[in-house]
Image: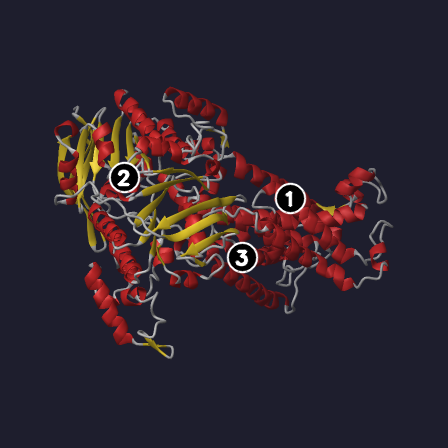
Amino acid sequence: MTSEYVIEMNHIRKEFPGIVANDDITLQLKKGEIHALLGENGAGKSTLMSVLFGLYQPEAGTIKKDGVEVKINNPNDATALGIGMVHQHFKLIEVFTVLDNIILGAETTKMGFLQKKEARRKVIELSEKYGLKVDVDAKVEDITVGMQQRVEILKMLYRDNDILIFDEPTAVLTPQEIDELMEIMRGFAKEGKSILFITHKLNEIMAVSDRVTVLRKGKYIGTVNTKDTNKQELSNMMVGRPVQLEINKDDADPADVVLNVEGLTVPSKIHKNDAVKDVSFNVRKGEIVCIAGIDGNGQTELIHGLTGLEKATAGKIEICGQDVSRASIRKRSQAGMSHIPEDRHKHGLVLGFTLEQNLVLQKYMEPQFQNHGFIKFDEVRKYADKLIEDYDVRSGQGPVTVARSMSGGNQQKAIIARELDRDEPLIVAVQPTRGLDVGAIEHIHKQLIEERDKGKAILLVSLELDEVLGLSDRILVLYEGEIVGELDPKKTNPQELGLYMSGALRKGKEAEQC
Amino acid sequence: MVFLIQQTLLFAVPLMIVALAGVCAERSGVINLALEGIMIFGAFIGVLFIRTMQEMNLFDKEQGQILMILALFVAAICGSIFSLLLAFSAINLKADQTIGGTALNMLAPAIVLFLIVMIAQQNTIGMVKGGAASWFMLRPSSFGLPKDYSWGFLIDILINKVYLSTYICIIVFVIVSVILYKTKFGLRLRSCGENPQAADSLGINVFKMRYAGVMLSGFLAGMGGFNYALTTAGCTSNGDVAGYGFLALAVMIFGNWTPINIAAGGLIFGLFKCIASTYATLDINGDGIYMLSEIGISPYVYRMLPYVITLVVLAFTSKSSRVPKAEGIPYDKGQR
């Protein structure tokens, strides 16, 4: 019996304690098509794919391969059926070579000894055939993220998989690398391989996929042909209400300099070189300055140096004219800096504390909240209630909810409430929308623009190109710890920005190397 | 000179093999602080085995080497079984591995001392008859040659007045190193200590590999423990291996979790340990290091040396060392 579909997942249901991650979901994949799986964070995309890959067992529903029902108990079963997956967070062993990573789990051996020659030949053949350039003897920790992804793809090809799952593959790539990846995906489809492409980026779906299945909150919404739909319709299906895709804002009207940074140098924790090298810039009242760049080019260290989480070895930092280069974190914050940190679990919240305790963390030492070192709990409660109301922070038990039990979006809202309510002239926001769904992102963007229009100076660090281009008034591109370009978002485009981010272009110099 | 080299090897080999034991466990992702305890256990079992065999009159002096080899492997297997306690607590119960290891370190000497007192009504057990040297040491007479026969300088270093167990340990060291780096099993084992999630996604059973790593670790540590008891302690056991397990941990860190560096590290520590314990011994063959005691430095300085060196070396090397990334973290399938 032959079937039109290589893989059918029928009425899949998967529960985790407290939530239904997949509720009656059906997904049908045709041979040789690129099928996009669209949904917000938490919509159940990854869970569904983990079920297909054998990492989870569904409570109900069946999986069919070529029309025949199969049971996938573990990744080995999936591999045997020809299903391969590139995970969102790469599953690579950093200290192993590229070759070792590719053969791991599918080794050829003779009397238990590894036979790498054969494997190396096959890997090189595959990499040439599909244009997946890798250095087989390099250690994974030394190669770029783009190459790591190619290693992941080669892992699937090495196992002769013909159903390829890509879980959010573009999140870590530059625009150029994304184009390359799409070309490679089209090549696979042409060869008869079937591709499942998980994403929440509408541009990519429109560019590369044949059909789209949309999930929302664990439920199946529908499957449409890409050529019969458009971005707006897809995003409405994904969110469940009309969403404003473009960010609307007036032109900036920058005034006095609030933050001035000169020659800032911050050492790296990972390698011996400085992670931030002699960086100078300023941020003025009433503008959003965005630091753009590929992850790992010194953004984290720059912000740590700026906020005092890490010691800068050289340079001067002034907030509202006050030199805080050597000041403690609290002094800096009192000089006029709010900080929405990159890692909301590590630096943003005390996860074991309640919501109200977290909300008062920046203010508990003020006379309003303490008396000779004793906290005035009623005042704290009043203040927390007000913030929860104003910033629409939702949680199970209101102010006494433990922060750990809140959803990511509401944790972020709590941090933003705490930091914005301090009403400081400078706001440092690091990836404020990371991991949030479209609705929450929209809300946070609006808030940041409101703050800007109130005359705040905002320094934004973002890895999302749409956010960089849509939200900022000025873009500084960070590449290997240096600012390599200053761009006007109105006069640039993703391609140009991508060239700066990958180091191909530099301020004042035309492409010197690629 | 011969004496010095032999003594260094004598001290270095247990360190090397026990450090490699640490590597096997930690490369699979389980911190094995229990090396000391497993050594103590292995040493006791080995000595007890020899003693029992002697009591049963199953072996006589001429078959000493066979008895010794058997004891070595019995000690190793029992070490492996003892280490299951750590594996169970660390892998199945997901307990804190540092605490689990420490518990084993406290358990081993207690049990061993208890049993020794039960068996021998004293604090030490040894052989029933003869001594380690007379039964197990290689010398010209073991090969049917006259007592003062000399093979020449090089061969004398290698086989005169040494224990065969030292060489067995070296061979096992090489075999295990090859297994770790050249086989499918080794590749998979190491992947579990670096990124178990990745290994799992490739169909590797992380639990099994970690069990294998810990048991291999126990095997080597038990072997190292008996080797210590045989050569350094003269085939006695008293519930103590003089901190060798912890020294081996230091050697492992110093050696950056790789066999070659560990071999080198083991030799360096062995040399200092050797100087510490033999500098003032009688100059048996006229080639000791008696001159050290004539300098007039307090003997305590020499005895401290290996431990001081450990501290100093670790202070300088531990910063640049590469710990297996996932060691000490219990593997949880649901976590991504």
Comparing A120 with B220, the one in front is A120
The image's colour scheme reads secondary structure
Q: Can you give x and y, in whole percent of width and height, for residue A82 in the image?
A: 30, 29
Disc 3 marks a residue whose amino acid type is Ala
Q: Residue at x 63, y 66 (%)?
A: B120
Disc 1 marks a residue whose amino acid type is Ala
Residue at mark 2: A466
Residue A64, image quadrant: top left
Closer mark to the observer between disc 2 and disc 3:
2
A491 lies above or below A364: above
For disc 3, the chain is B
Q: Secondary structure at mark 3?
A: loop
Do marks 1 and 2 both belong to one polypeptide chain?
no
Closer mark to the observer between disc 3 and disc 1:
1
| Mark number, residue B34 | 3
Q: CA distance from mark 2 to mark 3?
A: 53 Å
Disc 2 marks a residue whose amino acid type is Asp
Of all residues shown, which one is farthest toward the front? A255
Classify the position of the N terminus of chain A by image quarter.
top left
Q: Secondary structure at mark 1?
A: helix
Q: Residues within 10 Å of mark 1 (few under 14, many from 20)?
A: many
Residue at mark 1: B263
Locate residue A77 relative to residue A327 in the image: left or right: left
For disc 1, the chain is B
Q: Is residue A395 visible?
A: no
For disc 2, the chain is A
Q: CA distance from mark 1 to mark 2?
A: 55 Å
